[in-house]
Amino acid sequence: MVAELERQGRELSQRYQEVQLQSAQLQDLPEQIQGLKESIQVLKAAQEPKTDNPLLALPLSKTVEVLSDKETESAKLDIELSEMQAAAKRRARELERLQSELEPIRAQKIRATNDAQEAKRRKAAGMPGLGDELEERGRWLRGVDTALRAMLEV
């Protein structure tokens, strides 16, 4: 009987310690619950979109669709850009070719201008000869220059 009482005493002592431990844990529980509630509120606030851009708040499937559309658009723009770059290179080569053709004409214009000034000087000085031919040539060069400028939009 004494052994039975000692066994029951030990069991009761053990249960008492478990109850004390559980009551201490229960006293800490309201603080933990309050902390968890605050954490939930912070996480919910962080989850809400803080931007005016509605695309940033789309679900994954819609985001994938928008991304696919943007990638398609980007690919089209890349193709268009490469076409425009090729066209720009062609135009640059054409411009260089036209400028190289224009250089002799410019030199001819300078010579004609100098000849015209010389003809005016001779005409003013009363010297006969070269002036009529130079005036005719100057008119022709002026006409060619005007036509080339109109064609080249210079």
Image (cartoon, rainbow, N blue to C red):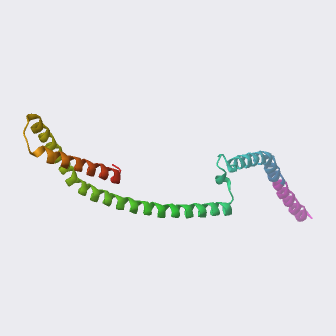
The reply to whether residue 58 is in sight is yes
Figure check: 86 above or below 38 = below
- Is residue 128 shown in magenta? no
Please report the residue visible at 45 percent of the width from the left and 60 percent of the height from the top: 81
Q: Quadrant of the N terminus?
A: bottom right
Q: Position of residue 121 (x, y in %)?
A: 11, 37
Image position of 140 (left or right of 89)? left
Figure check: 4 above or below 58 = below
Image position of 97 (left or right of 117)? right
The reply to whether residue 110 is in sight is no
Image position of 80 (left or right of 54)? left
Please report the residue visible at 14 percent of the width from the left and 38 percent of the height from the top: 120
Q: Position of residue 76 (x, y in %)?
A: 52, 63
**The furthest residue to the right:** 1
**The furthest residue to the top:** 124
Q: Position of residue 9 (x, y in %)?
A: 87, 58
Q: Position of residue 62 (x, y in %)?
A: 67, 61
Q: Main secondary structure of the magenta part?
A: helix
- Residues 135 and 37: in front is 135
Figure check: 28 above or below 7 = above
- Is residue 11 shown in magenta? yes
**The furthest residue to the left:** 127
Which contiguous range is marked in magenta? 1-18
Please report the residue visible at 38 percent of the width from the left and 58 percent of the height from the top: 88
Task: Tell how many labels.
Answer: 0
